[in-house]
Amino acid sequence: MNRQDMEEFATKLAPLLDGFTAEIAEDQPVYLVRRDGACLVVHRVWKRPERVKIIAGHTGGEAGYGLARHEITAAVARGPERVAADIKRRLLPTYERDLAIVRERLTEAAVADAQRARFAGRLRRLIPAAHVADEGRWLVARWHVGTATCVLTASGEASACRIEIDGADHDLVARMARALTQE
């Protein structure tokens, strides 16, 4: 199976899978995509030109999610109808379950990012002299009081986080506690 054959096969396969369309671009794999972000990649199987491998992908990659890799191989000679039936039966059920998990985790991450951004804004208002850095799951604020260096590190989603302050006086800690508990 050469590239043109694979493109033709994918073009015939896509309409048989509910909502998928073939995306074909030069120097790119052949993709079957759906509006909701579902993505299947059609590959030739190395040294087995009579077979294709269908690999399901997750938005934003799957390595960080700890989810199983979803893929099947199929004989091209069986035809697009039977390969589509295999995809629907063997690949899509578990892939769609995991895709829902990925979407949920992406939503949770977006909420956590927004919470951290609001928390960083409150820190900047509370301690104007502080340098506040959002380092992903960590917020770090550094500032100087006289010759002392103060560091505040907040981890978590900022709605329930652990804060450590080194080098701050009692008045600053009291002001920060009041300010950080206000919405």
Image (spheres, helix red, strand yellow):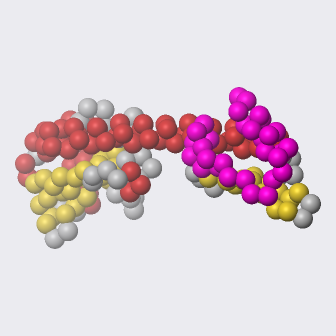
Position of residue 39 measured from the top left corner of the image (x, y, whole percent): 34, 45
Residue 93 vertical position relative to residue 58 in the rendered view, above or below: above
On-image quarter of the C terminus? top right
In the image, 87: left or right of 172?
Answer: left
Extreme residue in the bottom direction: 47
Side (left or right) of 152 relative to 60? right
Residue 55's x, y, as percent? Answer: 27, 53
Q: Is 65 situated above or below 46?
A: above
**Along the viewing direction, whichever of 106 and 122 lies nearer the viewer:** 122
* Count of residue discs: 0
Residue at the (82%, 62%) spot, across then down: 149
The stretch in magenta equals: 154-183
- Residue 130 included in the magenta stretch of the image: no
**41 and 121: which is toward the camera:** 121
**Residue lying farthest top?**
183
Examine the rendered structure and indicate whether residue 148 appears above or below residue 130. Answer: below
Q: Is residue 173 magenta?
A: yes
> Going 15% across and 43% down the picture, which residue do you hit?
90
Residue occupying the far right of the picture: 146
